[in-house]
Image (cartoon, grey):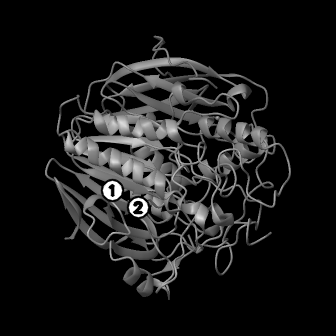
């Protein structure tokens, strides 16, 4: 996307589930919740010295379990990445309750964490009832964490309505994370983060228009200590903590969790900084797992991490969470935005890789959900950025791999023709702006049918305050009539899934360079069951 900076190729030149067993221990003794010091709700970083200063999170819910997460750190930006705790190990107690006051505790246990896990805790808390809210917290010594709210998925056939928010791209230096707090205030049932949760650049390595409002700690991230330090800085932000504590999350990474525009084993060129890319990926993946509420199944092995997975929510929605980085071929056209070249249309090229393409098709073929949702990172629909006779695309998006996109679409169409799959929704991040598009079977054929709906979330902060439009907006929309909406402010998308409709609301904050922005709705669409596409509401 034409966001700053463009690819340097042309412009510059995560312990194992830390005790997932439901081991019975004593009740969390010590101060009651009411006696725990209240953490500030003001934006910024948590108070130094608090071992739970990185907050709490949950994720990966199913009908009977959920992952509970925290990471201990008394000094979130310590240079060694160990949060001021060094080589010590810590026993951490956890509990899950049916009420906010923890008077009805239903599960509890004790786990041990230490430097091998970056002092992170992952608990796969099972034995929970489907389709209900729970509250959870941790204790280390006399310190008690803030409480988080989580929610289990409905039973397999249930058509329970689902409120879901999704977003992407939170560059710490570019602004305040107010949009995360506004997202938390939506009280969603689940949150999807579609990549660029953190950015790898050192201080000033990627400036927002008009300048940055705060600085990254440490150099560009290349080592495990670097990545752990950077995640510590992000997690210490209290607005981000509010979003994590509000609902369970499903996450996938994009490029900046490792390096800008990486593709499989191919680095951005020129290589800067130098070094072993496999080692850098291994460090990045390990730190990502340590800092996200992911299951043991997602724990990386060296420079490989199985991140694509399916997460059903009853009979209403199945989330197919994709990985569009690890298995792709190198970007065509020298990864130059707004270009076209013969290699772009080579049908052998794949963005998710052949194995994941088959996995996607198999998921469609076996679908029993009312809504099949692809949670993924880069623009799926075609967008020609060159008005008139010429053509220019984003080679880092699916437009750089149109044969791969055609195979995914054809897999969907084949499943619908067999009476299985029924409503396709593609969720996208990456591009630092809100977009909405009708997904066509073939974008270059004006008579081709609409087969799905794509919703693209803007960034939390990346790109700074933004604007309502850009000077090229009108021409781009005219060139791409299947694109139904565009807005260049920061924010997130709120969706409501029901049996007969999906309602999408594009939420924006008017500024991020100062804290406390209000949230506003810029557009609202309805997509009806078996009627793909977007209708303004």
Q: Nearer the viewer, residue 126 or 495?
A: 495
Callout 2 crowding tier (Cα within 10 Å): few <14, some 14–19, many ≥20: many
**Image location (x, y in percent) of residue 247:** 39, 44
Residue for point 79% across, 32% down: 86
Disc 2, SS:
helix
Q: Nearer the viewer, residue 490 or 81?
A: 490
Callout 1 crowding tier (Cα within 10 Å): few <14, some 14–19, many ≥20: some
Instruction: Identify the residue position indicated by label 2 in the image.
Output: 182
- Asked which quadrant contains residue 63, the reply is top left
Side of 498 relative to 248 (left or right):
left
Relative to 406, say whether 382 is above or below: below
**Image location (x, y in percent) of residue 269:** 77, 60
**Image location (x, y in percent) of residue 467:** 48, 81
Cα distance between the residues tagged 2 and 1: 7 Å
Q: Nearer the viewer, residue 519 or 446?
A: 446
Quarter of the image for the N terminus: give it.
Answer: bottom right
Instruction: Identify the residue position indicated by label 1 in the image.
Output: 186
Side of 245 relative to 324 (left or right):
left
Mark carried by residue 520 = none
Quarter of the image for the C terminus: give it.
Answer: bottom left
Whether label 2 touches label 1, CB < 8 Å = yes
């Amino acid at each position: 996307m034409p966001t700053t900076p463009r690819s340097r190729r042309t412009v510059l030149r995560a312990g194992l589930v830390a005790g997932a067993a439901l081991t019975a221990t004593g009740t969390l003794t010590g101060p009651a919740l009411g006696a725990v010091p209240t953490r500030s709700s003001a934006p910024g970083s948590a108070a130094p010295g608090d071992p739970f200063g990185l907050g709490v999170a949950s994720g990966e819910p199913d009908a009977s379990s959920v992952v509970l997460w925290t990471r201990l750190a008394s000094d979130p930006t310590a240079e060694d990445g160990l949060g001021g705790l060094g080589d010590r190990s810590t026993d951490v107690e956890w509990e899950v309750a049916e009420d906010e006051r923890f008077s009805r505790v239903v599960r509890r246990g004790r786990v041990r964490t230490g430097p091998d896990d970056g002092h992170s805790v992952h608990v796969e808390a099972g034995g929970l009832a489907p389709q209900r809210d729970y509250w959870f917290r941790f204790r280390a010594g006399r310190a008690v964490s803030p409480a988080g709210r989580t929610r289990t998925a409905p039973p397999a056939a249930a058509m329970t309505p689902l409120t879901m928010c999704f977003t992407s791209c939170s560059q710490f230096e570019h602004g305040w994370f107010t949009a995360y707090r506004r997202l938390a205030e939506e009280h969603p049932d689940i949150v999807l983060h579609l990549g660029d949760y953190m950015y790898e650049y050192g201080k000033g390595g990627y400036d927002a228009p008009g300048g940055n409002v705060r600085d990254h700690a440490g150099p560009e991230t290349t080592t495990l200590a670097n990545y752990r330090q950077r995640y510590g800085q992000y997690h210490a932000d209290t607005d981000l903590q509010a979003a994590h504590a509000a609902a369970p999350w499903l996450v996938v990474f994009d490029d900046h969790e490792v390096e800008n525009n990486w593709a499989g084993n191919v680095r951005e060129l020129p290589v800067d900084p130098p070094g072993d890319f496999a080692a850098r990926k291994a460090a990045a993946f390990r730190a990502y797992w340590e800092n996200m509420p992911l299951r043991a199944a997602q724990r990386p092995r060296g420079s490989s991490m199985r991140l694509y997975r399916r997460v059903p929510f009853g009979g209403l929605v199945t989330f197919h969470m994709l990985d569009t980085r690890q298995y792709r071929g190198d970007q065509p056209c020298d990864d130059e935005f707004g270009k076209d070249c013969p290699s772009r249309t080579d049908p052998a090229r794949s963005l998710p890789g052949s194995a994941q393409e088959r996995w996607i098709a198999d998921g469609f073929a076996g679908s029993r959900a009312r809504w099949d949702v692809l949670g993924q990172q880069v623009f799926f629909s075609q967008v020609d950025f060159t008005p008139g006779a010429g053509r220019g695309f984003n080679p880092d998006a699916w437009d750089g791999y149109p044969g791969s996109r055609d195979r995914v679409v054809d897999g969907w169409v084949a499943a619908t023709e067999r009476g299985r799959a029924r409503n396709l929704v593609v969720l996208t991040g990456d591009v630092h702006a809100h977009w909405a598009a009708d997904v066509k079977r073939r974008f270059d054929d004006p008579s081709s049918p609409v087969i799905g709906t794509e919703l693209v979330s803007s960034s939390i902060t990346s790109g700074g305050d933004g604007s309502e439009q850009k000077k090229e907006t009108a021409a781009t929309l005219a060139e791409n009539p299947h694109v139904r909406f565009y807005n260049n402010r920061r924010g997130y998308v709120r969706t409501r899934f029901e049996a007969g409709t999906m309602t999408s609301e594009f939420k924006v904050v008017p500024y991020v360079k100062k804290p406390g922005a209000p949230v506003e709705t810029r557009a609202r669409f309805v997509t009806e069951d078996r009627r793909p596409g977007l209708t303004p509401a």
